[in-house]
Amino acid sequence: MSLHGKRKEIYKYEAPWTVYAMNWSVRPDKRFRLALGSFVEEYNNKVQLVGLEEESSEFICRNTFDHPYPTTKIMWIPDTKGVFPDLLATSGDYLRIWRVSDTETRLECLLNNNKNSDFCAPLTSFDWNEVDPNLLGTSSIDTTCTIWGLETGQVLGRVNLVSGHVKTQLIAHDKEVYDIAFSRAGGGRDMFASVGADGSVRMFDLRHLEHSTIIYEDPQHHPLLRLCWNKQDPNYLATMAMDGMEVVILDVRVPCTPVARLNNHRACVNGIAWAPHSSCHICTAADDHQALIWDIQQMPRAIEDPILAYTAEGEINNVQWASTQPDWIAICYNNCLEILRV
């Protein structure tokens, strides 16, 4: 997409509600497309699909659909070649898979792991496996992680119906699980890690689920909220504690000892995104209105200062680095989405 020489550094979109969850589309034919989830503290919430118009250089909303409760996470199918259906997943009370077309977005399947229909334990997060897009993993406040398998069923008309089943469910932590992420190590299909309210980072292998490895425990046993694997070097991951102002970088080869601490933020960190194209760059975003990009090449020497800083007009709720367009980072604050050229 050539933006006709009008190369702006920042594009902004204002939603009708507070934006929390968001994600870049990775399809080659949908470059500047993002999904945004509302944060409204009631049952009725929304998801919008927005795209940057080439001619006007403005974001437009292409589609809005209803979602029960706020989305805790949104992710497009990690399909960089465009061979799968154009699918979007959301987590909240359940994991939902949506099919996107030019005219509408419709619910393809709702994945529910609760045999007891009266109660559902909300999902805090999920991840979609990049190597095998038929695998997703969810994390829940009921202490478990669930690995789901998707099937693209028989063709009805010209549409393959997508359905899903539980491949495995495991008790991952002693308390609530807040995030889950597949690792690119060992082929990228079978290893994943989770973090939770017990303050630990744990690593699992789908082939040997009878045991897990504790990679890190927060010294004060503060809950760990987010976990993010380095996109180029699967030995490194980043995590952060609830209400914490620093991001901890871990090396799985040296368990329990952080290799770096990034602590320039002046308020609690809300988001972490590794660069898709570089093993030594990471972006952090926080309630201090700042998005900071760090170069961590010097590890294990202390990383004193970020190399880039951007100040937004509000507390930044989320940050996403576009995996197929590495010079763009998206942030959201208040009711705004901004994409920044880096």
Image (cartoon, rainbow, N blue to C red):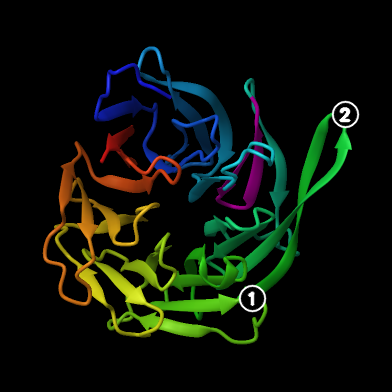
Mark 2 falls on what kind of element? loop
Q: Nearer the viewer, residue 107 or 254?
A: 254
The quarter of the rendered structure image containing the N terminus is top left
| Amino acid tagged 2 | Gly
The tag earlier along the polypeptide, 1 or 2, is 2
Looking at the picture, how far across and down is residue 11, in whole percent?
Answer: 30, 27
Query: In this picture, which residue range is highlighted in magenta?
Result: 87-101
Q: Using the image, determine if residue 28 lies above or below residue 240.
A: above
Q: Please give the label number shown on residue 170.
A: 1
Q: Using the image, determine if residue 176 lies above or below residue 326.
A: below
Mark 1 falls on what kind of element? strand
Q: Residues within 10 Å of mark 2 (few under 14, many from 20)?
A: few
Question: Which residue bears the numbered disc 2?
Answer: 157
| 276 with respect to 11 (left or right) | right
Q: Report the residue that reaches farthest toward the top.
A: 55
Q: Nearer the viewer, residue 188 or 292?
A: 188
Q: Residues within 10 Å of mark 1 (few under 14, many from 20)?
A: few
The quarter of the rendered structure image containing the C terminus is top left
Q: Please give the label number shown on residue 249.
A: none
| 318 with respect to 288 (left or right) | right
Looking at the picture, how far across and down is residue 179, in whole percent?
Answer: 47, 64
| Amino acid tagged 1 | Leu
Asked which quadrant contains residue 333, the reply is top left
